[in-house]
Image (cartoon, rainbow, N blue to C red):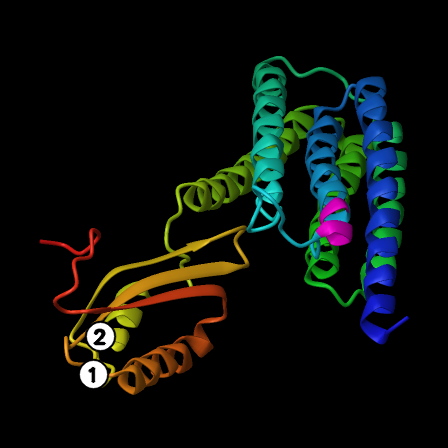
Amino acid sequence: MDHHHSHAQDSNASIRAAFFLNLIFSLIEVAGGFLTNSLAILSDALHDLGDSFSIGFSWFMESRARRPGHGSYSYGFRRLSLLAALVNAIVLLVGSVFILSRAIPRLFAPESAHPEGMLALAILGILVNGAAVLRLRDGKSMNSRMIAWHLLEDILGWAAVLVVSVALLVTNIQILDPLLSILITCYVLYNVGRNLRKTLAIFLQAAPPELDLAALDRALGAIEGVLSTHHTHAWSLDGEHNVLTTHLVVPATASRKHIIHVKKAALRLLEHADLEHTTIEVEYEDEDCRMRPD
C-alpha cells in the first residue's frame, strides 16, 4: 500500500466518523428541540442536518472521486456533488421556512422554553462537534479541512445557545429564544443562497470565477503565428475541476512544424490556469469551420 493510499483511507475514516457523530447528534437535537420547546435548538438542528448531508456526501465522494469515467459518463461522476448541493439547498430552504413560520409569531407571543434542557444540549453539542473537529484536524484532503471548518461554525452556534440558555435561567426573557432562532436561520439562508448561486452557475456552465477568460483568450491570440481565436470556452465540472476549449486560426501556409509550435505555446500558456482538461483545435484561415463567426 502506498503512502497516498494510506492518507486517503485515513481521510475517509475521519469523514465517516464525523458523519455518524453529526447525524446522530442532529437527530438528538431535533428531539431535544421539541422537548425543550426551543426554536433556537431546532434552528441549530436544521443547520447540523444540512452539515450532516454535506459530510455524508463528502464521505461518498471521498471514496469515489478517483473512479474514471466510462461509457456515457466520459467526464466521470464529479457532478454528483452538484446534485447533492442542490438537494441540500432545497431541504435547508424548506426547513428554514418552517422555523421562521414558528419563530416570528413567538416574537409577539413568547412561549416558555426549558433553559436547563437547552443548557445540557448546548454543552453536549460543543463536546460532540469538538470531538469531530479533533478527529478531522489532521486530515490531509481538502474535504476533511472544509468539513472541520463547518463543524467549527456549529460549535460557535452551540456557544450562542449556551449563552442564551444561561441568560434564560437568570432573566427569564423568553423572547431571546425566538430571536436566536431567527438569527441562526438567517445565517443558514445566507449560506444557502450563496452556495445555490455557485451551484447554479456551474450547472449553467458559467466560466469559473478564478479564470479570466477574456485575458486568456487575448493571450492565446497573441501567440506568434496565431491570426485569431474563436469559441474559447471554460466551465467547471464540479467547482474544482475546470475544462477549457478553444479554436486557434493559423495562416493557410502554416507548416506542420508551425502548428506543433502553436500548440506547445498554447499549452505552456494554460499551464498556470490549473485546468483538468483542455481541447485546442488549430485550423487554417481558409478552412471552413462551422463554428467560426461570420
> What residue is rendered at 27% in x and 71% in y?
215
Answer with the quarter of the image where residue 121 lies.
top right
Task: Tell me which residue sits at (84%, 28%) in the image.
Answer: 27
Check disc 1 and report the residue beneath it: 225
The reply, left or right, for residue 168 in relation to residue 271 is right
**Where residue 283 appears, x then y in whole percent?**
24, 68
Q: Of the residues shown, which amino acid type is indicated by label 2? A: Gly
Q: Is residue 53 left or right of residue 269?
A: right
Considering the whole magenta stretch, tell me its main secondary structure: helix
Residue situated in front as seen by the camera: 171 or 78: 78
- Using the numbered discs, state the Cα–Cα distance from disc 2 to disc 1 in whole angstroms: 9 Å
Q: Nearer the viewer, residue 168 or 255?
A: 255
Residue drawn at (81%, 38%), measured in percent from left and top? 166
In this picture, which residue range is highlighted in magenta?
60-64
- Relative to 249, does residue 63 appear above or below in the rendering? above
Give the residue at mark 2. Answer: 221
